[in-house]
Amino acid sequence: MTPTSSAAGRPRPRPGCVLAAALLLLGAPAVAGTTYDDGPALAQRLLEGVVRVSADEHGFGLVVGADGEFVYVATARHVVGAVEQVAVRSCSEALPADLAAERVAGFDAQAHDLALLRFRRPAGYVVNVHVLAPAGEVAVGDAAWLLGRDDTCAVLPRPGAVAALPNERALWRADMPGVLGGSSGAPVATGRGILGLTTDSDNANITVIDIALVAQRVQAAALAFQLVGADNIPPGDPQAAERDLAEMLDRFLFALRDAQTVLRGPTVRRDYFTTTVTEYNVAAKRFRDAKDKYDGTLQRHWEAGVAQEWSALRDRLWAAHQNFLFVNAHAQAIVETERVPDAVRERMAALEPELAAVQRDIAHFLLSVNQRRVVHANTSN
């Protein structure tokens, strides 16, 4: 079947595939932009907004917002002390390595051990705003990670745990053995995002200023606080399995069907083929990333049989994927001639019954995931 050009210049996907994709998403909708990283991976990503601060003491800070002229950094006030000019070093390549910062005049949060710094906004710099943990989704016992210690921009390898929710002074407590100093102002994160900034530590635990208080004080000074929820669901949470698997399967099925349609026709425009291959590779990578990620979660939070069903489905998908690797040997010829070799067309036609069966298996698996969930464990990490 020759692909038909749409107004957007892409082959029109097969109607059956579009319908299936829509139905699968209705079963378990995924939120646009949601990520499914474990705690250490998320914490590593969040280092993008962390800076080292050198003033009266050495510590860390968190980029909380920017305007047309300045980038704003919240840190612990005792790190800055009475110093007006502060040296800041970025923990990532998102910002220049060394920056000259200054205290924001008129920002008064001494009672909360908070200070606000600012430095000139580099051209093209965009704040990573998706970093915060929703307070209602953090519980005592959740694993926690420290983003900076002893003048080192790194995630503390050994996780701690949330020991107490914010008190009347908006202070969290986290069990974090071995943190003796050099971490003031450093963010503390769970698998859901950043809780707040370190204000005090000893050999057993740390005290953390609630990020909600930081937001309140910055906004009260009419300055930019732009941080919002991280939109991350850790893989151990059954919600992650429901959403990530549904979205991944929908996209991979769509990519399989779209590629099959393009390669069943005798001719294909070069740009159609290149775009189809690119989109297929993105979907296949997401499948590879997710296929082994939720084995434990499915076993812990669903009735017996769902994990086995997933194992059989992913094996079947992997086998279908191998058929498209066969195209690699013909890709250069397709690009050069804009014709699909007979061997490829025959392979794609023969694949039709298997893809139809895979499509049915995906629908059945997602129904099982949606209908048979049994929650009986802590899923915060």
Image (cartoon, grey):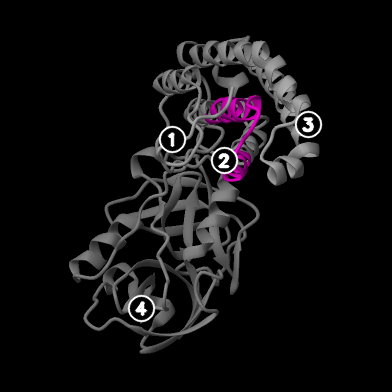
Give the labeled residue for mark 1: 6
Q: Position of residue 29 (x, y in %)?
A: 40, 27
Please name the residue shown 69% across and 44% down the image: 335
Q: Which mark is residue 326?
A: 3
User: 30 or 74: nearer the eye?
Assistant: 30
Asked which secondary structure carries label 2, the reply is: helix
Tell me if residue 360 comes above or below residue 346 in the rendering. above
Is residue 321 visible in the rendered image? The answer is yes
- Of labels 4 and 1, earlier in sequence is 1
Which residue type carries mark 3? Phe
Q: Decide: marks 2, 3 in contact (CB < 8 A)? A: no
Pointer 3 local density, CA inside 10 Å: few below 14, some 14–19, many at least 20 = few
- Which marked residue is nearer to the observer: mark 4 or mark 2? 2
Main SS, magenta residues: helix
Please name the residue shown 40% across and 81% down the image: 80
Q: Position of residue 275 (x, y in %)?
A: 57, 43
- Which marked residue is nearer to the observer: mark 4 or mark 1? 1
